[in-house]
Amino acid sequence: MFAQEFAVKPGWSYYAEPYVMFPNMSGKTALGNLPEMNVDVDPSQIFENLQFGAMLYLEASNEKWNLNSDLLYMDIGQGVKGNTLISSGDVTAKQLGWELAGLYKVKPWLEVGVGTLLNSIKLELDINRNTIGGGTTNVKKEMTQTWVDPMLIAVFKNTPGKKFIYTVRGEIGGFGIGSEFAWQLQAYAGYRFSKLFQIQGGYRIISLDYSTGNGSNYFLYNMDTYGPVIKFGFHL
């Protein structure tokens, strides 16, 4: 039973994979002349932080090439940690990430290549700033930034046709072209139930260190978004 495999047909094959990520956020953000704010989502609040999310991975591959698209949108809200400048507050991050990548199959279990990652982040801050002499002043600000990060990608996976499946995907990029530095790490394991359907579970980390502008136009998004993922795959 456990040795059974699925036949691998020559030529192009296609794959669609909607998935769900339950994200945490950790890092710093700032808008304009407002002070930097620390964001740290407690894992125990994981189901409370995702206000909306849509995720879809698509793939076309043959014996030598893997062309793929990964679309992720998350609307996450979280309180910020107070400090000497800030009494309390909330940050909402609407994050769109869309990556297009081309990978070459060096080995049946190893793919390497390049991609372009489009990031669009809308930050909304609502904070209570401490004032001299006591009390607080409420300040609200929002800003949207869009940029593209080049990415270097390596994927390790089981050989095609297996029932028990695993995938590890690592990426580094940005290099000051978009983000100062960007990286991702994904690791999954699962089971292919039929020629059509498989399911995987695992963990994903997305790290972006991006800043631009100065003064009232300053925008900082130095954030790690991470959490468990469930993926539902369909071989077309």
Image: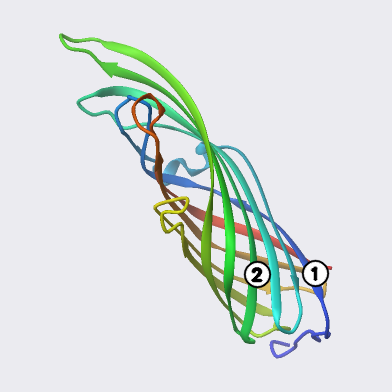
**As shown in the figure, which amino acid type bears the numbered disc 2?**
Gly
Residue 26 picture quarter: top left
Classify mark 1: helix, strand or loop. strand
Residue at the (37%, 21%) spot, across then down = 127
Residue at the (28%, 12%) spot, across then down = 136
- Residue 17, given in percent of the width and then of the height, sits at 72, 60
Would you say 191 lies left or right of 144 here? right
> Would you place residue 7 above or below residue 231 in this image?
below
- Residue 227, given in percent of the width and then of the height, sits at 49, 53
The extreme bottom residue here reads: 3
In the rendered image, the quadrant that contains the C terminus is: bottom right
**As shown in the figure, which amino acid type bears the numbered disc 1?**
Tyr
Classify mark 2: helix, strand or loop. strand
Nearest to the observer: residue 18 or residue 210: 210
N-term mark: 2 or 1? 1
The residue that mark 1 highlights is 14
Label 1 crowd bin: few (<14), some (14–19), many (20+), radius 10 Å: some
The residue that mark 2 highlights is 102
Would you say 132 lies left or right of 21 here? left
> Would you place residue 144 above or below residue 171 in this image?
above
Nearest to the observer: residue 213 or residue 69: 213
The extreme left residue here reads: 133
Distance, label 2 to label 1, CA atoms, is 14 Å
- Residue 46, given in percent of the width and then of the height, sits at 48, 44
Label 2 crowd bin: few (<14), some (14–19), many (20+), radius 10 Å: some
> Would you place residue 2 above or below residue 197 in this image?
below
**Mark in the foreground, 2 or 1:** 2
